[in-house]
């Protein structure tokens, strides 16, 4: 049996929980070993925006860690993964990651990815942005994070919100090196 590639997925407390849930569905279908983190507010947003429970998400993940469990395997650089996705990424989480303030497992796992040179994608979900937000994104990018706000594209002529979400998340996965056929490239 072939070893499955490990990926960390964190869903934090910004609006746009559908992006994180779709990433979980896609990663599962691509046979990735998904290590899931849900912030406390992320759990609330999932319930409010998607009418899903934590159990609905846990059924699709291989592993789940409480966001305060700093002894979890993903808190160590010796636990090899192919990166981490924070979808959506709240400004609070961005701030912790950008300043290396690893106060919880989401921020610590992200910090581990940066220090180990592994891909870290932050789907920052906030608008409008003030100078402080932009400075935090710059700081995170300077440390190696990929800043990927979930902005939909329209060249593929989406016919539904579902199509826009799927294409956006598929492009996020591709950006961190996860090949997939969930979207059309320009010109296809």
Image (cartoon, helix red, strand yellow):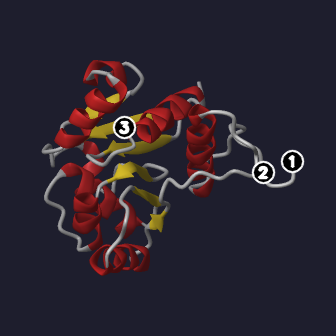
| Mark 1, other Cα within 10 Å: few <14 / some 14–19 / many ≥20 | few
Q: x, y (%) of residue 39?
A: 22, 42
- The CA distance from mark 2 to mark 1 is 6 Å
- Would you name the residue on which mark 2 appears? 185
Circles 2, 1 touching at the beta carbon (< 8 Å): yes
Q: x, y (%) of residue 161?
A: 57, 35
Residue at left offset 43%, top offset 33%: 21
Q: Is residue 186 left or right of residue 63?
A: right
The answer to whether residue 32 is seen in the rendering is: no
For the image shown, how many numbered marks are present on the structure?
3
- Would you name the residue on which mark 1 appears? 188
- The CA distance from mark 2 to mark 3 is 28 Å
* Furthest-right residue in this view: 187
Residue 35: image tag: 3
Relative to 68, does residue 92 appear above or below in the rendering?
A: below
Q: Is residue 121 left or right of residue 134?
A: right
Residue 27: image tag: none
- The CA distance from mark 3 to mark 1 is 33 Å
| Mark 2, other Cα within 10 Å: few <14 / some 14–19 / many ≥20 | few
Relative to 34, does residue 134 appear above or below in the rendering?
A: below
């Amino acid at each position: 049996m072939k070893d499955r590639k490990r990926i960390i997925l964190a869903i934090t407390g910004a609006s746009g929980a559908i992006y994180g849930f779709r990433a979980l569905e896609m990663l599962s279908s691509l046979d990735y070993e998904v290590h899931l983190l849900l912030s406390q507010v992320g759990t609330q947003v999932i319930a409010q925006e998607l009418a899903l429970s934590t159990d609905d998400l846990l059924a699709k993940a291989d592993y789940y860690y409480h966001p305060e469990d700093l002894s979890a395997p993903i808190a160590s650089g010796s636990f090899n993964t192919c990166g981490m996705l924070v979808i959506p990424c709240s400004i609070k989480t961005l701030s912790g990651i950008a300043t290396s303030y690893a106060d919880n497992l989401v921020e610590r796992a992200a910090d581990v990815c940066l220090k180990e040179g592994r891909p870290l994608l932050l789907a920052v979900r906030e608008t409008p942005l003030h100078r402080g937000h932009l400075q935090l994104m710059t700081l995170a990018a300077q440390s190696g994070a990929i800043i990927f706000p979930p902005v939909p594209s329209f060249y593929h002529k989406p016919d539904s919100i579902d199509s826009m979400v799927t294409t956006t998340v598929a492009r996020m996965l591709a950006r961190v090196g996860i090949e997939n056929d969930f979207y059309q490239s320009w010109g296809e």
